[in-house]
Image (spheres, coloured by chain):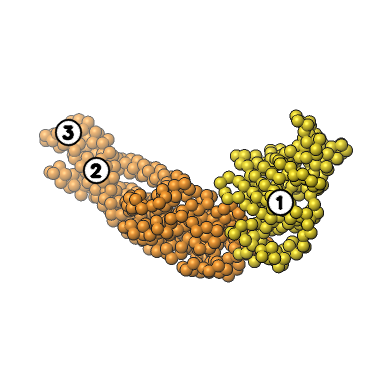
Amino acid sequence: MKFALIALRNLARHRRRTLLSMLVVAAGAIAVILTAGFVRFSFEGLREAIIHGGLGHLELTPAKTAGPTGPDRAAPPAFADWARVRAAAEATPHVLAAGAALYLTGVASKDDRSAAFVGVALEPDRERRMSLEVKLRGGANLSDSPPPAGEDQVLLGVGLARALGASPGDVVTVTAMTADGTLNALDTRVAGLVTSGLQELDARLLKTHLATGQRLLGTDRVSSIVVGLDDTARTEEAGDALARRLRDGSAEPLVITDWRARAPFYGQVRALYSGIFWFLGGIVFVLVCLATSNTLLMSVMERVREFGTLLAIGTSRGQVALMVVLEALWLGLAGGLAGDVLAALLVAAINRAGIEMPPPPGAAAGFPLQLAVRPADFVAVVGLMVLVLAVASVLPALRSVRLRIVDALGHV
Amino acid sequence: MCDVVRVSWAVAVTVSLSAPVRPSDPALDDLLRRSDLGALAPFSFRSRMRLTAGDKPPLDIEVWRKGESRTLVRLLGPREQGKYLLRLGSDLWFLAPGAKKPVRLGPAYRLRGSATLDDVLGRQYARDYRVEGAADEEGGLVALDLVARGPGVVYPAVRYVVRRATFKPVRAEYRLPSGKVATIVEFDQWSAGERPYARRLLVRDALHGGSTTSVDVLEVEERPVPDGLFDLADPAARRSLER
């Protein structure tokens, strides 16, 4: 404790050098906090965009049409007992709502233009209760109630609408293979234009009401049931609860797939960003380490006579080295705390600035930059900076213990 | 040096383009003409067929045909009421009760499994193809190598295997521009009479796992067919079929 106080006094004596070292440490802390905030914002933003963009947290699929990444979208709809399973799912804790989904592929045509589509028929009221986002770019959303025959509506991806020359209010004929393998076609009115956020998907995307999808495919079955939860963190817990509930009550074997398995893209992005983060973190670690090590070494060199005197009056070499290390630790602590304060101010400023980021590759729109920083990050960064300074102090401490008293006392 | 290569290429291309078409063998042409089911079909007729493929329920269709270029396929069954495929020349249209306007389909549209409309109704071999070569096969069969006379046909080459003694086709192998076999149609169970027809066709998809579609011809009736059935804009005549 005594040496810790002495180390602190030493830092106070050399204010200019201490301030310089603290600035280096603080800059490193700020870099780490901002990078962590950006990476976390990217992870969380992508995760919630995937889930609320239509994937939901969990998907229940009959085993015979289930694949490792969710339902086989090309297979005919096979879920017969879906209404009862949906009710059971909605009675499970943390489930906001569960909605049936029917996957469609076919050709949409208007006048002499036609384009292939990949579509989904769903229940708009339940989609809303699940907080699944419909990014309208024109017109209106689908009506909640099932449309009567002859009044079917669709939402078209902006790219698909452009290819067809269709706008809200136009009639588009939708053609698809029925569950029996024959062709069917329906006239539908374009209710609105939507974007998925991905240009390639927007060129093929079609959404419609479940009733319209079933009418088109000539079936009363669905492909799967999508489940929305109140908290993404509870996905595993809710999945287990659902599995227990459905094990006894379901007439057909079901497979429950969580959002992560259905979005391998997320795992890839996360791995890539994590790699970038650790690489940048490593660079910051080395830079701060070198800069502070240099400063500490200079400090030792400037205080050779002081250390010689201490050794001459009986202070052990270990105690001198300890003092150098403690000074470094104090620097790490103070610099880390200063970095925390400055980083907090910067994060607040950046989040308020409303900086618009350019669209990521393949995306249809940019996004506002927000840094997602947590209190734990500030604590961790201080710990990291103390560790960095501990490493940086090794060389100066070794230098101080190798001093010869006679030479040190005569050092100019 | 470059100019020499360029000129050599130009000469080679010119020579190849201007090479005369090999005159065909009259005996082989006659064999093709006499075994061409498409050309031998009645001018106008009604037919009923059943297509079966995989685990899907069988699809029953009624075919109305007048001349070479007009064909109406009515899909039968309670769920298919009011659905038609209309072939006018090289255009194929789908008509459904839920859609006011006809939907244009590609010529390779598959009725069921791997069977296209042309696979089911037969092609006009003598009209659309010329005999490029022939080879004898075991069992009194002759394999005619047919090449399309011009662009616009789905398959540029066909190997048409015919029984020489009876002029009845046994098998047709449809080839893609790459030379790869896309579809194989086997003709089986011949009817008796003045205009024989294969009562069963087996259509095999040679590209995608070799799945087979069976086409059973249940009925063929030579009869006049009203022009109104082929009117793309006016469904009145077709409605009379639904009653």
Of all chains, the one bearing label 1 is: B
Foreground residue among A167 and A346: A167
Q: Is residue A111 left or right of residue B191?
A: left
Helix, strand or loop at mark 1: strand
Could you tell me the amino acid type at mark 3?
Arg
Residue with the mark numbered 3 = A317
Could you tell me the amino acid type at mark 2?
Ala
Give the image location of residue A136, x and y in percent: 50, 65
**Mark carried by residue B219:** 1
Give the image location of residue A372, x and y in percent: 35, 55
Q: Colour of chain B?
A: yellow
Residue occupying image coordinates x 55% and y 54% = A179
Residue with the mark numbered 2 = A328
Helix, strand or loop at mark 3: helix
Chain shown orange: that is A
Q: Quadrant of residue B204?
A: top right
Q: Is residue B52 above or below residue B74?
A: above
Could you tell me the amino acid type at mark 1?
Glu
Q: Are marks 3 and 2 on the same chain?
A: yes
Q: Quadrant of residue B214?
A: top right
Q: Work out which residue is located at the far left of the displayed protein and give it.
A: A314
**Mark carried by residue B90:** none
Q: Is residue B205 above or below residue A41?
A: above
